Image (spheres, rainbow, N blue to C red):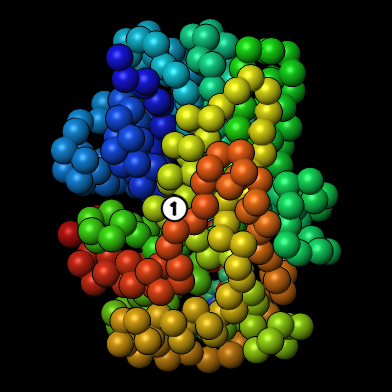
Amino acid sequence: MASKVLLTGGAGYIGSHTALEFLLAGYEVVVVDDLSNSSEKAIERVEKLADKSVRFERLNVCDGEAMRKLLTEVGAVDAIVHFAGFKAVGESVQKPVEYYRNNLDSALVVCEAAKEFNIPKIVFSSSATVYGLAERVPLVETSPTGGCTNPYGWTKYMIEQILRDFAKATPSLSVTLLRYFNPIGAHPSGEIGEDPLGIPNNLAPFVCQVAVGRRPKLNVFGNDYPTPDGTGVRDYIHVVDLAKGHVAACDHAKPGVKVYNLGTGRGYSVLELVETFKRVNNVDVPYEIVDRRPGDVAICFADATLAREELGWTAQYGLDEMCRDAYNWQKKNPNGYRD
Ligand code: UD1
């Protein structure tokens, strides 16, 4: 019988791409999502792409009773992959209590569910943000953590700790903490992709909206960083590669806690990304250099060796494909899933 995975937040950007990769790898997929920042259409398209069905339940993971009811119905689950959470960095500064309440409560419900239903594996959607204002790059999994610059980052940090403590008390449990670098791009089909509400905070969706004329220009936050062209350097990773990292994590999970960076190991500057986007898509992206954005670091990229050695996972796509697929999705779905 196929292994069954439960994806919380499985209708969102990374969750939907991961649902697809699990289906393609032969898993049965159950998605829970409250659709507060996602669309059921993403699930329908995942089903079409995989030619398989997903069991979808609209619920908030913080609702322990609803989760219990669902888990009673669906039978043995092999792994919970926990994506659900608030994720806007700026908003988390304005609404810290809401962020702590939502993100920590949902993680605690995941732990309670794993305990009550004997679910052997938890995979958590963590972030390079847990490294805070890192002093040295590339970041390795043993680099210091903490010193996060916003409540969103602290929720990731705290949930990692909660899961470590839970694993310590539950020797049969496997916990994998996946620290994402900068996921961008979309499925090459252009059927699923990133659909931010309102003005995008992150670089790639903003560039896409400028390229299709939804916004007049990109603001480049600072060109006086100690980097080759002065703009910030990040480790962008194709969302399909990232999604596959979750399947590899489930396939290789053993009791105990494991932490993996999911990045390409290569950094690109803001201007390199913009120039690549223009070249591969043959489109203009007007931009202006403005002040630095508070809280931004100059350079952040991963050492992704551990994931390669232990999970047999490496990123396959380069920046060209990331930019091509991001734009393809944006052109096919100028208003995201809201068409
Ligand atoms: C941010 C968050 C990180 C979170 C990630 C995904 C911070 C400090 N970090 O990462 O915690 O996990 O998003 O949501 O907020 N840039 C521009 N113009 C723009 C947007 C971005 O020049 O309009 C630049 C930034 O200064 C940065 C790079 O592009 O150098 C990438 O920015 P972004 O996509 O927001 O990601 P991070 O800041 O790396």
The percent coordinates of residue 310 (x first, y second) are 61, 38
Task: Decide which of 67, 322 is in the foreground and name it.
Answer: 322
Left/right placement of residue 77 relative to residue 254 reads: left
Where is residue 66, by image quadrant?
A: top left
Q: Position of residue 281 (x, y in %)?
A: 31, 81
* Residue that appears at 72% across and 74% down: 298
Q: Is residue 133 visible?
A: no
Ligand 1 is located in which of the four quadrants? Answer: bottom right
On screen, residue 269 above or below 132: below
Q: Is residue 61 above or below residue 158?
A: above
* Whether residue 287 can be seen here: yes
Asked which secondary structure carries label 1, the reply is helix
Report the amino acid beneath label 1. Answer: Asp
Give the quarter of the figure containing the N terminus.
Answer: top left
The residue that label 1 is drawn on is: 241
State which quarter of the image contains the C terminus. bottom left
